[in-house]
Image (cartoon, coloured by chain):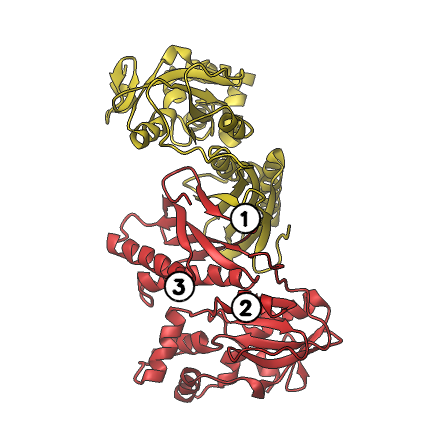
Chain colours: A yellow, B red
Amino acid sequence: MLGPGDDAALVAAPDGRVVVSTDLLLEGRHFRRDWSSPYDVGRKAAAQNLADVAAMGAVPTALVIGLGIPADLPVTWLDGLTDGFRDECAVVGASVAGGDVTRCDLVVLGVTALGDLGGRAAVRRDGARPGQVVAVAGRLGHAAAGLALLDAGVPARTDALERAVAAHRRPCPPYQEGPRAAELGASAMLDVSDGLLQDLGHVAAASGVRIELDPQAFAVGEPVLAAAKELAADPLEWVLTGGEDHALAAVFPAGVRLPATWQVVGRVVEGEGILVYGREMGRGGWDHFR
Amino acid sequence: MLGPGDDAALVAAPDGRVVVSTDLLLEGRHFRRDWSSPYDVGRKAAAQNLADVAAMGAVPTALVIGLGIPADLPVTWLDGLTDGFRDECAVVGASVAGGDVTRCDLVVLGVTALGDLGGRAAVRRDGARPGQVVAVAGRLGHAAAGLALLDAGVPARTDALERAVAAHRRPCPPYQEGPRAAELGASAMLDVSDGLLQDLGHVAAASGVRIELDPQAFAVGEPVLAAAKELAADPLEWVLTGGEDHALAAVFPAGVRLPATWQVVGRVVEGEGILVYGREMGRGGWDHFR
């Protein structure tokens, strides 16, 4: 409604409530200028926050960005970053409403996303109940596979490997599935940013339930399988523990009819923690399971 | 409505629009850990963004904070910072709704404030018209005087000097005067963050008008006068060019009856730029005037 150039921006909030999420992203820790183009950094930084908003069941409306940049940063880098923010916002019909720029020794991005619930209840983490089913939408393990390829210095010789690396550079969150899940009656939801096991662990803890996952229910993507073969790695480890794809994980009432974009991968039972392969997720991490 | 701990926070926006402002604050550039307590850093960082929201005519409702902290930062420092954020929010009835914490070599604060207009039109920078009057509310020059004392290493031997240093450490923006000015019919408003001359220059440029200031109309505060005497400086330079007090400057229709919290200090005429002492504000900065 009123964009950059004033003390503050003005964003429509027709619902009478506004969903807001913020993240701080640092060069070297969250992105590398030698691994990702400025355009991809912008898209990824935007995607991460827009996905948080979608995971509440809201439609993202706007981003505001606090930007720290080194004095010697090329203007073309800044242009690419801005284009990336704009284009990722456009995917969901949101816009960049404002920002703040300051000098910094490294590139720092303070990204805040706003969203509108359109009359829906916010879908929190604490609503999972025994008897319900757990489902996921979007990619899982792609970004982790791509990062592993980059880490190992393995060239992306095939289309599948290239897609894994591309997934690390630019996530593709299933934004529209957030509000859709809310309308389908999701009782808990989050965006998978730290890995499915860890993030579902938050749902289990907040809801006071146990979540049992069926590893064989996951449709593992071709890029993940190709990267696993290339690096002699376990593809399911990336699927279950990889972050950065910003898939959505949600809990639905039993018997719900889900669209094909959602895969049922587990169920909610009495108890606590996460159960995979009949063993409890513990401090040992992934190795503990196999 | 829903605070920290989920993917995103939920904030009431009864107006159906939300005002949003974001800033990135960096240790070394925007604050120094050896000059300010963590509590004061939190209050100041919050105040800066809450004042931006008030300057649109809105009542601040919430802050979200992206926080970068070094691994060796004492927990007590973080506690003090959090207390500062909370207490400054409490001044305006807002709350800290959420945040994000990440490791960083220096302390980085990405602060975003939200606010509600309560049905009022947003007061922008481009609404000043010839014939209107310019008024200010809040302190001017106090923070700049305090910073000059700190820079010079002058001990705050008197109460007045101590108040100047305290004003640098913790601003005291006249938050309630923002919505009040909007209700009194302000046609343009901003919070003074870079200095009154520079910030009113933005109003003049955006509105296509000239602003004439009367230097003798300013009630210069005792801390400013005391610091000027101590450092043999010009107190009016701090008043007209000092930032960080987050006073509000607004343009009102001629003949408006303003409460005592607002001082009329100038008028809007045809033309461009800022006129002080009958001379135009130019690239020469303050020295150019005297």
Vertically, is A19 above or below B164? above
Q: Disc 3 on helix, strand or loop?
A: helix
Across and down, in percent, residue B69 comes to: 34, 50
Disc 3 marks which residue?
Answer: B91
Q: Nearer the viewer, mark 2 or mark 1?
A: 2
* Kind of residue sitting beneath label 3: Val
Coordinates of residue B277 in the picture (x, y in percent): 64, 86
> Tag 1: residue type?
Val
Quick check: can you spot residue A90? Answer: yes
What residue does disc 1 label? Answer: A64
Residue at the image position 47 percent from the left and 70 percent from the top:
B174
Q: Tell me the chain of label 2.
A: B
Residue at the extreme right: B270
Query: Does residue A153 show up?
Result: no
Distance from Cα at disc 1 to Cα at disc 3: 24 Å
User: Residues under labels 2 and 1: Cα distance?
Assistant: 26 Å
Residue on which the image places disc 2 = B180
| Amino acid type indicated by mark 2 | Arg
Q: Residues within 10 Å of mark 2 (few under 14, many from 20)?
A: some
Q: Is residue B43 above or below residue A223?
A: below
Q: Position of residue B5 (x, y in %)?
A: 36, 40
